[in-house]
Image (cartoon, grey):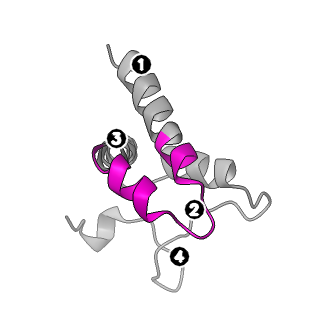
Amino acid sequence: MHLPACQMPQTKSGGHRHFIMKKEHTNTALVNDLMEFSPFGALTQVFIVDAIQSKCNRVIDQQEKLIAEGHPFIEMEAWVGCAKDIKTRIDEFYK
């Protein structure tokens, strides 16, 4: 989907604004910024929640393979646990 330039926030030089807050460099600040400030409005929130749900479902569906293959930096049982926890919380929220 592409919005016409007149609907996209722009800088004086014609480039699109960056909404990422520069004061706080945390994942929480980034996600909050993405959810609150988007030229696409509430559609961005739907996109982000859908992306999280999709990732959780993929991890849960592939959990045996992921655990068997392992990862050099991430304990895959914990990764799967995160996916299950997040999925449960989202499912409860949207009941």
Looking at numbered disc 4 in the image, what kind of residue is underneath it? Thr
Furthest toward the right, the residue is: 23
Do the CB atoms of the residues marked 4 and 1 lie less than 8 Å apart?
no
Looking at numbered disc 1 in the image, what kind of residue is underneath it? Phe
Gap in Å between the C-alphas at discs 4 and 1?
Answer: 37 Å
Q: Which marked residue is nearer to the observer: mark 2 or mark 3?
A: 3
Residue 10 falls left or right of residue 27: left
Q: In this view of the protein, which residue sits in the foreground, 29 or 88? A: 88
Q: Secondary structure at mark 1?
A: helix
Q: Position of residue 65 (x, y in %)?
A: 34, 56
At a point 60% along the width and 60% down the height, the residue shown is 74
Q: In this view of the protein, which residue sits in the foreground, 5 or 92? A: 92
Residue 28 falls left or right of residue 67: right
Residue at which label 3 appears? 53
Q: Secondary structure at mark 3?
A: helix
Residue at which label 1 appears? 93
Residue 19 numbered mark, or none: 2
Instruction: Classify 10 Å Cα crowding around label 1: few (below 14), some (14-19), many (20 and above).
Output: few
Q: Is residue 60 above or below residue 3?
A: above
Q: Quick one: label 4 or label 3, which is nearer the N terminus?
A: 4
Gap in Å between the C-alphas at discs 2 and 4?
Answer: 11 Å
Is residue 71 found inside the magenta-colored segment of the image?
A: yes
State the predominant SS element of the stretch in magenta: helix
Q: Quick one: label 2 or label 4, which is nearer the N terminus?
A: 4
